[in-house]
Amino acid sequence: MKKMKRNYNGWALTNPEQLLNKIDVKHRNEICDHITLSYPASQPAEATENVVAIGIVTTDTVQAVVVNVNGTNVRPDGKKFHVTISVADGHRPVESNAAIEAAYSSESCLNVEYFNIPIEIDVEAF
């Protein structure tokens, strides 16, 4: 796995095709590379084998899957664990946070489209 300097901790997807083969990528800029644990980096991610995608949120600008890590989809900062799948031109992966938050809000017209069968994801802590 290529080492990169990051200002966040989490898990790198070791086999993005586990998701990409089961999802219709909506936007031109495919990301599908990591799950954030903490930003800025404040605690190291521990190795885990219990990571599953449970649903997807798609907007005009971002597409992300909500992920359970060790049985929860809530990060220590209260945001949802997720993988940004794709973004539209001129948009950034961080925008997935707002889209997911809106999808979980009772006041939003966005919804999380839950998978019938969760998708297992292989990861490596960084």
Image (spheres, rainbow, N blue to C red):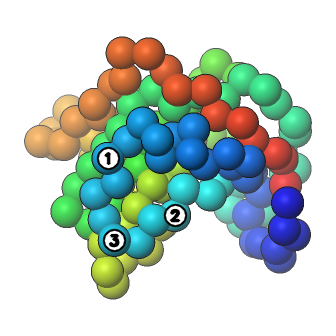
* Badge 1 density bin: few <14, some 14–19, many ≥20, Cα 10 Å: few
Q: Residue at x 48, y 55 (%)?
A: 84
Q: Position of residue 122 (x, y in %)?
A: 72, 36
Residue 28 or 99: which is nearer the viewer?
A: 28
Q: Position of residue 33 (x, y in %)?
A: 62, 57
Q: Position of residue 5 (x, y in %)?
A: 83, 76
Question: Given contact means CB atoms under 8 Å apart, are the residues at marks 1 and 3 in contact?
Answer: no
* Badge 2 density bin: few <14, some 14–19, many ≥20, Cα 10 Å: some
Q: Residue at x 60, y 48 (%)?
A: 16
Residue 33 or 43: which is nearer the viewer?
A: 33
- Residue 28 is tagged as 3
Q: Amino acid at mark 1?
A: Asp
Question: Given contact means CB atoms under 8 Å apart, are the residues at marks 3 and 2 in contact?
Answer: no
Is residue 80 at least partly visible in the picture? no
Q: Amino acid at mark 2?
A: Ile
Distance in Å between CA atoms under marks 1 and 2: 13 Å
First along the sequence among labels 1 and 2:
1
Distance in Å between CA atoms under marks 1 and 3: 12 Å
Q: Amino acid at mark 3?
A: Arg
In the picture, measured across the screen, residue 118 lies left or right of residue 125, that is left
Most extreme residue toward the bottom is 90
Q: Quadrant of the N terminus?
A: bottom right
Label 2, on which residue? 31
Label 1, on which residue? 24
| SS under mark 2 | loop
Is residue 50 at least partly visible in the picture? yes
Q: Quadrant of the C terminus?
A: bottom right
| SS under mark 1 | loop
Foreground label between 1 and 2: 1
Q: Position of residue 81 (x, y in %)?
A: 56, 41
